[in-house]
Structures are given as C-alpha cells and as structure tokens.
Image: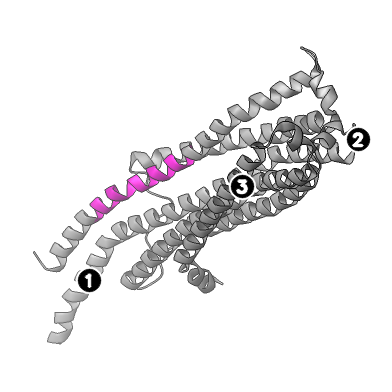
Amino acid sequence: MEKMMQNMMKHYPMMIGMGFMLVVIALIVGAFNAANAAAYYAVDKAVRDASLELAQVRSGIESTVVWLPYFKFLGVGMILAGITMALGVIATGLQKMATEVLGKAPPKPRSAMLMRAWMMLGMLVILVGFIVSLGVAGTASSVFSNPIIAIDAAESGSAILAGLGSVHAAASWLEAFKFVGVGFLFMGIINGLASILYALNLQRQALPQVVQKQGAARSTAPAMAGD
Amino acid sequence: MAVPLTKLDKETRGLKFFPLFTVTGWVLIGFSILVQALVLSPTGAAYWGGNPKAARDAAASGSELLGQLAALAWWPRLLAPLTFLGVAAFMVGIALLFSAIPGILERRTGGLKKAIALMSGR
C-alpha cells in the first residue's frame, strides 16, 4: 500500500498537466458561453422572452453557468493535488536519504500520512461538488428551456417555480464544495511542507551522531589492524 | 540511532505563526459556508421558488419579499471577498512554512561544515 502510494506520488507532472488542461477547456467553454450570451442579449426583449428557440440558447447559457465553475475548480484542485504529490516525492526522497545515512529508517512524521489523506479528501469533495453541479445544471437547463414569459407566468407550486427555487438554493450551498475542497488541498500542502521541514530538521540533528559514529569506527579500525 | 524528534522545531517566526493563518482560513471559509447553507439557500428557495414573478414585482417596501431580496443581494457580495480572504490566509500560512526552509538549510550548512572538518581531522 505504502509502495503503491509512493509510486502514485511520482506521477505528479501528469496530475498538474491534466489539471491545467481542464482549466484551459473551461476557458474555451466559457468563451463560447460568453459568445452565446452576447448573441442572446442582442435580440430585442419581446422576441427573446417569447421565443422557444431562444429559450434553448438561454437554457444552455444558464446550465453552463452552473457547472463550469465546478469544472474549473476540479482543474485547480488537480493542480493543487499535483503540488502536494511533488512535496510528497521530496519528503520521501529525504526520508530515503536519512535511512541510507543512519542505517535504519528514521521516525516518520504524522504529517506525511495526513498530507495524503487531506489531498484525497480535497479531491473527493471537489469531484462530488462537480457531479452535484451537473445535476443542478440539468435542472437549470429544464427550467430555462421554457420561454421567459412562461417562467414569469408560473404559479406558486408549479414545477417551473420549484425548479427555479432549487437552482437558486443550490447555487448557495454548492459553493461549500469548492472552498472546503480547496481548504483540504491546502491542508495537504501544509502537511507536505511540514514533512519536508521535519526531514530537514532530522538530518541536521542527526548529523553530529553520524559524525561521532564515523569517528568511533575510524579510531577502532587502526587498533584492530594493529592486532 | 534514534533521533528524538516529536514535533517540528519551532525555531523560526514562520513556523510559529502559520497555524494562526490556517485556522483563520478555516474560520472565514466555514463562516461563509454556514451563511450560504443556513441563510442564503433557504432564502433563495423561498423567494424564487415560492412566489410568482407578479408577486415578486409587486412587493411593497418593508415587505418580507423585499427583505428576502435584500438578503439575497447583500450576503453574496460580502461573502465572496470573505471567502477569498480565507483562501489567502491559507496561502500566507503556506508561504510562512516555505520561508522557514532557508533558515533550516542555513543551519544545516553550518552543521555540515563542522562535520566535514571533524571527519577530515581538521
């Protein structure tokens, strides 16, 4: 398990590359959505509000506005996870170096385990947020595929108004997924850095003992040669 | 050879203050999430889902509907910068941790110099 985790950590450039690609894709989709919105609002209000065809355009615009930020955060989350993995590779390298010099494995800090746990938890929260946002985007799409005059005429208790209410309500609580996920990923980075600082401090403190051991070995070697 | 290291050496200012920024980050993000989940979400559902457009447009000054609309306009504008302040606090904490590395490396260099001198018998 430990070996598998360490091997996974080495793939951090791929994780960062994939995250960056997602952010670039989000930019392209955002640009298309902006162009659609510009075209939609260029039509006069009376036609816009009554047209079923334009309602489909609006449905696309509104649903993209719901899911796209979570897709962007998925990309940013993958980049942050990649940074955590890179820190993990450095910490593991320092740990291996200390093992070789000291002759046995030094104590492993708890932060090394926590780093991976926070990172995976952060990615999970962001991924769940993205999946839920796709569901909300579906609701937004079905609500806004009705012409504006139909949405405006919807009575209390109607499906359109219930859908509109759920889209607006979800827009508030969905935010939690983004920022809690990013918070967990930052905790992963903090623990990764703490592991590196721990390893560096350990090496500094172990150095005099290594030198003493070397000195003792050297002083006994000539005596043994003399026997 | 067991090296007694139970926690990080808190030798630099950065290592002393980074938890403060991390906690600040969680407090700000947590507050924002609580308001969004407990205030904004039910208000949004009630305002948009419970009232037809005619009722929303006809709401008089001081009515509950306009109060809900004011809350829906006020909180998001306040919470967005607050949440980003939380994210920034996390980043400052990370920067403080990074800033501890040069000091540790410097002291390690001093230790290495002494060790090399001892090992070469100078």
A6 vs B37, left or right, is: left
Upstream in sequence: badge 1 or badge 2:
2
Q: Residue A68 lies in magenta, yes or no? A: no
The residue that label 2 is drawn on is A157
Q: Is residue B66 above or below residue A224?
A: above
Amino acid type at mark 1: Gln
Spatial separation of the CA atoms under disc 2 and disc 3: 31 Å
Q: Which circle marks residue A33 in the picture? A: 3
A143 vs A100, left or right, is: right
Residue furthest out toward the top? B61
**Do the CB atoms of the residues marked 2 and 3 lie less than 8 Å apart?**
no
Q: Which residues are magenta?
A: B89-108
**Residue depth check, mark 2 versus mark 3: number of the one nearer the observer:** 3
Q: Residue at x 30, y 57 (%)?
A: A205
Q: Is residue A10 above or below residue A144?
A: below
Amino acid type at mark 2: Gly
